[in-house]
Amino acid sequence: MIGVIVEKTVNMVMADQKVMERMKVRQLSAVDQLTSLMFDLDIDGNCELNVSELRNVAEHPQLQELLRDIDLPAGFSVEELFDMLDLDSSGTVTRNEFIGGLFRLVFSTDFQRECLAHLRETHVKRCVLKAQK
């Protein structure tokens, strides 16, 4: 009896892992396609995106589909995506920032996300302290 339960549990875990692997492959493909699309739609051709360029393409059907494939939270706006990817708060997102940010978003473990959250918190504290001086 215990052997049957263990076998069914192992099979369920393996099936879940296969579903997660397929989802990651789909997300990886979406990140690649999204990066190409975004920089093809770079209006001024400077190889950087700003928030208004992103707003201009926000309703692009392929962009909407790719964002759904990445599985961002419901109601997540392109402005919020931009803010999340603009790590240095420069007002622009380079191709490397875009790709790196999306990979961190899609492929990080819970522990890695927690580390990034603490890092962002430290950066905010540092900025506040600098502004006070």
Image: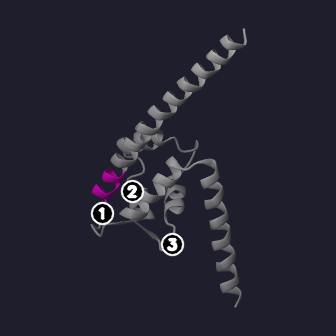
The amino acid sitting under disc 1 is Ile
The residue lying at 38 percent from left, 61 percent from top is 53
Q: Could you tell me which residue is drawn at 31 percent across and 66 percent down?
A: 47
- Is 30 left or right of 43, judged from the image as shown? right
Q: What element carries label 3?
A: loop
Closer to viewer: mark 2 or mark 3: 3
Q: In which quarter of the image is the C terminus?
A: bottom right
Position of residue 68 relative to residue 104, above or below, is above
Q: In which quarter of the image is the N terminus?
A: top right
Point out the tag, 3 or 1, that comes first from the N-terminus.
Answer: 1
Residue at label 1?
43
Residues at discs 1 and 2 in contact (Cβ within 8 Å): yes
* Nearest to the observer: residue 8 or residue 56: 8
Residue under label 3, please give it. 88
Label 2 SS:
helix
Q: Position of residue 69 (x, y in %)?
A: 45, 38
Q: Earlier in the sequence, mark 2 or mark 3?
A: 2
Residue 115 vertical position relative to residue 123 in the rendered view, above or below: above
Q: In the orientation shown, which residue stands out farthest toward the top?
A: 1
Q: Which secondary structure dominates the residues rendered in magenta? A: helix
Locate residue 117: give its quadrant. bottom right
Please say if the residues under marks 2 and 3 sit with CB atoms less than 8 Å apart: no
Residue 56's disc number: 2
Question: Residue lying furthest front in this view?
Answer: 3
Give the magenta part as a residue range. 35-43
Mark 3 → mark 1, Cα distance in angstroms: 22 Å
Give the amino acid type for the residue marked by disc 2 in the picture.
Asn
Give the Cα distance between marks 1 and 2.
9 Å
The quadrant holding residue 92 is bottom left
> Where does the image place residue 54, in percent across and percent down from the top left?
41, 58
